[in-house]
Image (cartoon, rainbow, N blue to C red):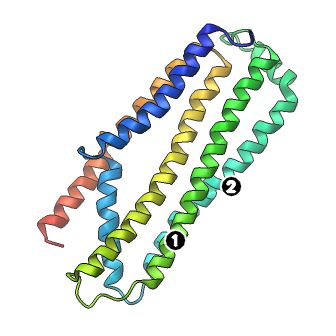
Amino acid sequence: MSLTVFDFIALTLFFTCWIGYTQFARIKAKNTACLSRVLHQHRILWMRQILDNDVRVSHAALLSNLDRHVAFFASTTLLILAGVLTLFTQVDNVNEVLSSIPIATERNHVAIQIKLSLLGMIFVMAFFQFTWSMRQYGFLNILIGAAPVAEQTTNPALLDYAKQMGVVQDQAGHAYNYGLRSYYFSLAALSWFFHPLMFIVSSLAVVYVLFYREFKSKALRAIILAIKDLESEDI
């Protein structure tokens, strides 16, 4: 067989980590303070601020900056995909390089092609997420362009409009986050070329890093304190 039983175990654990963490983070965010939850609150506050301003140049610049980051990763993903596809024609060279690494297990051409296919699939998924994020930022720009100037921020209809703009921006941010998450797991998949055990350890390490940054990071604590400060001032 091209892959050993250990390879299949490592691959199964990899997808379990990726899919499992995505579902875990989505469920836990409903009742636990995390980056996605607190940023959602900030996005709604930001959209409320937009309604209070007739001149929205600064807001447009901020949104353009966010969109530019997404566009950078989308274009970079295409370049990476081109590199992965090129490696399919250089399997002999890849095999030779791996053979020169002491910790790398013996590989055959089919196994290398399977691993390259996994990398290709990951970056295709990342590209779809980044482009969907770009489209949603475009939708948000339309909503902001159509937004009226609020005479009073307590108007229920206007507050609901600001909330829906925040939801659209939130979805764009989630798509961007999913694309970045694909990059993290692609690094774990890269270790599969060397050894299945490294693949397992890397997958678990990626989950730990993602969990720490989402639920335990200093940035999260600072953003939570910022929300509390705003609430204490009744802004």
Q: In this view, does 75 lie to the left or right of 85?
A: left
Residue name at image x 36 percent, y 43 percent = 26
Which quarter of the rendered picture does the N terminus lie within?
top right
Residue 156 shows in this picture: yes
Residue 64 shows in this picture: no
The residue mark sitting in front, 1 or 2, is: 1
Q: Mark 1 points at which residue?
A: 139
Q: Is residue 38 left or right of residue 203?
A: left
Residue name at image x 46 percent, y 24 percent = 204
The earlier-in-sequence mark between 1 and 2 is 2
Measured as percent of width and height from the top left, residue 32 is found at 24, 44
Residue name at image x 36 percent, y 35 percent = 24
Q: In which quarter of the image is residue 134?
A: bottom right
Total labels: the figure holds: 2
Q: Name the residue under label 2.
A: 75
Check the image and name the residue furthest to the front: 157
From this view, report whether residue 170 is shown above or below residue 213.
Answer: below
* Badge 2 element: helix
Q: What's the amino acid at mark 1? A: Phe
Measured as percent of width and height from the top left, residue 79 is found at 74, 48
Q: What's the amino acid at mark 2? A: Ser
* Badge 1 element: helix
Residue name at image x 23 percent, y 79 percent = 156
Measured as percent of width and height from the top left, residue 231 is found at 16, 65
Q: Is residue 134 left or right of residue 39?
A: right
